Image: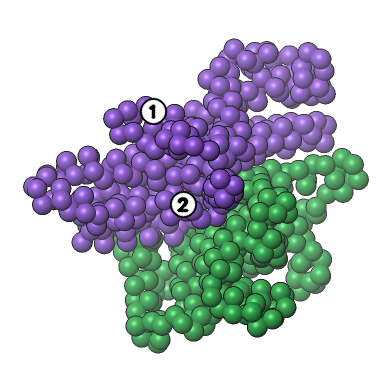
Chain colours: A green, B purple
Amino acid sequence: MYIYIFRRILLLIPTMLLVTLIVFLMTRLIPGDIIDVMISEMSAGGGSGFTSREALEKKLGLDQPLHIQYGKWLGNILFHGNLGEPLLARQSVSQMIGERIGVTLELTGMSILISLLISLPIGIYSAIRQDSVGDYLTRSLGIIFVSVPPFWTATMIMVYPAIYWGWAPSMELARFSEDALGHMGQILLPAVVLGMAISGLTMRMTRTMMLEVLRQDYIRTAWSKGLRERLVVIRHAVKNAMIPVLTLVALQVPTLIGGAVIIEEIFVLPGIGQLLVDAVTRREYPIVSGVAVVFGAVVIITNLITDISYSWLDPRVHYQ
Amino acid sequence: MNASPENSLTPDPLKPRSRFIAFLIKLVKEKPAGAVFGVMVLLLLFVGIFADQLAPHDPNALNLIKRLKPPSAEFWLGNDHLGRDLLSRLILGAQISVIIGMAATTLSIVMSVLIGVPSGYFGGWLDMAVQRFVDAWMAIPGLIILIIVMSLVGPGMLQIIVILGTYSGIQNSRVIRSAVIGIKENTYILAAVAIGCKPSRILLNHILVNIVPPIIIVFSTTIGWVILAEAFLSFLGFGLPPDIPSWGGMLSNEGRRYMERSPGLAFWPGFFLALVVFCLNMFGDTLRDLLDPRLKGGQGSYGAHKKKLKAALAK
C-alpha cells in the first residue's frame, strides 16, 4: 500500500513538470504586438508604468533565452515557493494567491458538498424506481442541470430578486473572523449555483452505478434474507456504487475551477478566480502563470487523493 | 410482428445509404423523445443557416428612440440599449453558435483522431509520451487555458474556433485512443496484419471505419460544450468582439449592465443558450444509447427491449 502511494507520487512529478512547462510556454510566448499593447495600457494607468520596451521585456525576463527563463522560474517555485513577481503590484504572486485561495477553496468545497446533497438522493431514488415517472423526470432534471450555464443562473439571481424585492447579494464579503455566519451565508448562494451545475453528471453516474450494483447477487441475497428496502439500498448497494461516483467528483474539479472563476467574477468574491480574470485583463502574466500552476497542482493532488482513497472505500481493491 | 421490420434494421453492407435510413427508423421507433430533440437540433441548424432571412429587423440597425423598450408588436422581445431588435440579435447569435459549434467540433474531431489513433494503435513509447502530455494538459482546468490563450491572440471568430477545437481535440483524443485499443485486438485486424497490409491501409480501411460510432458520440457531446465555452469566454470578454452578437457576450455586456431597466436583455440570451445545449445533450444521449455497443441491451434501450419482449410473448 505505502509502496503504491510512493510510486503514485513519483509518477506525479513528470506530470507536474509538464504542467509547469505548458503554463510557462503559454504565458511567455507573448506575441510582440501584445508587448506594445501592454506598454501603452500600463503607462496609461499611471506613472508607475513601463516607458520603454526594454524595461518591460527585462521585467518579464524576455531578454534571456527561453530555457534559462524556465529554469529560473521553476527553481524559484521549487526552492523558494516563489511563484514570481508581478509587473506592477507590490505583493509577490505567492502572497496574493495565499490571501485569496481560502475563498476559492470554501466556494469549491461547499459546491461539491451541495452537489452531492442534490445528486446522491435523487440518483439513488431514480435507480430504485427505474422507469417510473419520477425516474424520467429526475433524469431530465439532471440534463437540465448540465445544460444551464451557471453564469446565466448567477446573473438571474442578481437580476430578478433585485427587481421584485429590491434584494441583491452584498458586494463585499464579510470576514470569517468577524462574522462567520454572514461570511458562510454569502458564499452559500454562489456555491448552490455552482453545485447545481456539477450535480447533473453526478446524478446520472449515481443512477447508472446503482442500477449495476442492484443486479448483483449479494443484493439478491440481502433481499431474500428479508431485509428492509432501506437497509438493502443504504447498507449494501450505495456503499458499493460510490467508487465511480467519487472518481467523477474528482474528475469534475477542473470544471468546478472554471465555474468558480466566472462565479467569483459575477458575485464579486475575492478568490483566485477573480484574481486570474483581473490579471489576464491587466496582462499581468506573472500572476496568470502563478494561478494556473496552483490550479494544476490542485487538480493533480485531488486525483492522487481519489486514487488512494479507493482502498479505504473498497477493501477488495489491492495495490501492488 | 413479422420479419419485415426486423429486416429493415439489419444493415446491408452493399447499400451504405440504406443503413442511414435504417438508423433513422430505429431512432424514431425506439427513442421517439430523442427524435423530437433531433428535430429541435435540426431547427437550430436551420435558424443558423437562414438567420439573415429569418431576422425580422436588421440586427445592427440603431434606433435610439426605442432604447431599452419592452417587447412590442413590432419588436417581439424588445430593444437593447442602442435600440437594436433583441430578437434579431438572438437569431444572429444562433448563427454564431452554429458556426462556432460546427467548425470547432469538426476541428476537434480531426485533432482527436490525429492524436488518438496513432497513440492507440502503435502504443509503446509514442503512446507513453503522448498520454503524459494529455495528462498534463487535462490537469490545467480547460477554461483557464482558454482565457489565457484568448487574451494573447485577441478576440475573434477564427481564434476562438481554432482554440476551442484544439483544446477539446486533445481532450477527446483519450476517447478515440481507447476505442482504437478496443478494436485493434480484433481478429480482422490481426488477419489484415497477417496478409501484409501496410499500417496506413489498416488505419484507414479497418480502424477509422470502425471508430465512426464513438466519433459521432464525441461530436454530439463536444458541440454542446463548445457552444457553452464560447459563451463563457465572450461573457468574460475574451471571446468574440462586442459588436458580434454572441449569446454569452449579449448576456454580459447589455444584459448585466441594463438588468434593472430591462431584465429581458439578460434573460433571453441565456435562456436560448440553455435550451440549445439541453436539446443537443438530450439528442447526444439518444445517439449514445443507440450507437454505444457497450450499452446494447442495457439501460439505454431498456424500454425498447421490454416492448420487443412483450411482443414476442404475445405471439
Badge 1 density bin: few <14, some 14–19, many ≥20, Cα 10 Å:
some
Write down the residue under mark 2: B296
Q: Residue placed at 69% from the left, 43% from the top?
A: A152
Tell me which corner region of the image, top left, top right, bottom left or bottom right, holds residue B48: top right
A287 vs B230: above or below: below
- SS state under label 1: helix
Write down the residue under mark 1: B18
Q: Residue B26 at x, y = what percent?
A: 50, 37
Amino acid identity at mark 2: Lys
Which is nearer the N-term, disc 1 or disc 2? 1
Most foreground residue, B73 or A287: B73
Q: Residue placed at 44% from the left, 29% from the top?
A: B21
Q: Residue furthest left?
A: B196
A294 vs A88: above or below: below
Chain hosting mark 2: B
Q: Could you tell me which quadrant the C terminus of chain B lies in?
A: top right
The numbered disc on residue A289 is none
Q: Residue A52 at x, y = what percent?
A: 42, 42
Q: Residue placed at 82% from the left, 36% from the top?
A: B260
Asked if badges 1 and 2 are on one and the same chain, I answer: yes
The reply to whether residue A5 is in sight is yes
- SS state under label 2: loop
Most foreground residue, B287 or B53: B287
The reply to whether residue B239 is in sight is no
Most foreground residue, B11 or B78: B11
Amino acid identity at mark 1: Ser
Q: Residue furthest front?
A: B315
Badge 2 density bin: few <14, some 14–19, many ≥20, Cα 10 Å:
some
Cα distance in 3D space between marks 1 and 2:
21 Å
Q: Residue placed at 65% from the left, 39% from the top?
A: B274
Tell me which corner region of the image, top left, top right, bottom left or bottom right, holds residue B69: top right
